[in-house]
Image: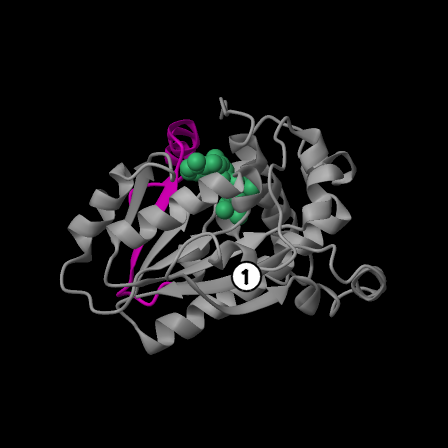
Amino acid sequence: MELQLGDVQTTALIPLAVKASETLRSAPRIRDDKAVEIIKHLNIDTKQYDKFMSHEGVIARTIMLDRQLKGIIKKHPDTVIVNIGAGFDNRFSRVDNGKLLWFDLDLPDAIAARRKAFKERERVTMIAGNALEKAWCDVVNEKLGERESKPVFIAEGLFMYLTLEQIKTLLENLKECFPKGGILIAEQNNKMMVKNEKYHDTVKSTKAHFVSGTDSAQEIADLTDGIRLIEEHSFNEEMKKYSIRAKLFALLLPNMNDRWATFEWG
Ligand SMILES: C[S@@+](CC[C@H](N)C(=O)[O-])C[C@H]1O[C@@H](n2cnc3c(N)ncnc32)[C@H](O)[C@@H]1O
């Protein structure tokens, strides 16, 4: 499979490579057979995208966000979920309950690559569009129908490639497009990572740049009125369970790791 991806879009190869190699381990902590299949078809060296810290971070966030979503889906089986900046993510397969509606949104070249790997699936819609524009909202709203529960938006590995001004635009669009309310689960990196991106073990192998970071998710909530911060967790909480190196990292540099937070409006 040949890929033609822009600089930020290429970063989707990092979680893809990690999830594929983890799945092939003797005791995988997460399984993603689709990632294994895609990596097999790609003619690229994935070693540069699968280094220790990125590997452990992606596995931690996958476990934590799978758990978080499964909790929401258990309470609201007809949930509508929009994966913003989906890349090659295959979380739908792990959390599907036979009822939910799922949308994978990414930039047009990323979705073109995704379409080569993923067939159309019932209740899953791929949307080629810029998250910072509002056209994609119509596709979601058309299918929302009578579903009562608040739509859930995931932004995993996205905010660090957006400026705070762009994140504000996204939040304003979400509020405007889904005025009855919604839930946003978003990953952020630390401000220090923006200055130190050349030391990031895998992103340094891409041409993408970190353009924003936060010390607290409250900085995201404060960008726009009506967005409430519900909870925030460091990847360290999960990562430190698996290796001494990760435990030491959490102990010595507790604020360095990425975090995810839940926000609500409406
Ligand atoms: C690090 S990857 C994460 C992919 C996926 N969320 C995962 O965890 O496997 C970042 C993704 O965000 C997408 N992205 C960046 N800017 C975007 C935008 N303005 N609109 C939609 N997607 C965007 C990229 O194309 C890329 O697929």
**Where is residue 210 drawn, in percent x and y?**
63, 37
Q: Quadrant of residue 127?
A: top left
What residue is shown at x 33% (from left), y 51% (from top)? 174
Mark 1 Cα within 10 Å, few/some/many (few <14, many 20+)? some
Q: Amino acid at mark 1?
A: Gln
The way the protein has been coloured in the rendering is: one colour
Is 85 a magenta residue? Answer: no
Is residue 81 toward the left or the right of residue 246 in the image?
A: left
SS state under label 1: helix
What residue is shown at x 68% (from left), y 38% (from top)? 49
**Where is residue 179 drawn, in percent x and y?**
24, 58
Is residue 60 toward the left or the right of residue 264 in the image?
A: right
Q: Is residue 65 above or below residue 77?
A: above
Is 105 a magenta residue? Answer: yes
Question: The C terminus is located in which quarter?
Answer: bottom left
Residue wearing tag 1: 218
**Where is residue 111 drawn, in percent x and y?**
39, 34
In this rendered view, identify the residue nearer to me: 42 or 156: 156
Is residue 107 toward the left or the right of residue 261 in the image?
A: left
In this rendered view, identify the residue nearer to me: 67 or 37: 67
Task: Examine the rendering and report whether any part of residue 66 can be seen.
Answer: yes
**Where is residue 247 drawn, in percent x and y?**
81, 66
Q: Which residues are magenta?
A: 96-121
**The residue carrying mark 1 has its beta carbon less than 8 Å from ligand 1:** no
Task: Examine the rendering and report whether any part of residue 36 can be seen.
Answer: no
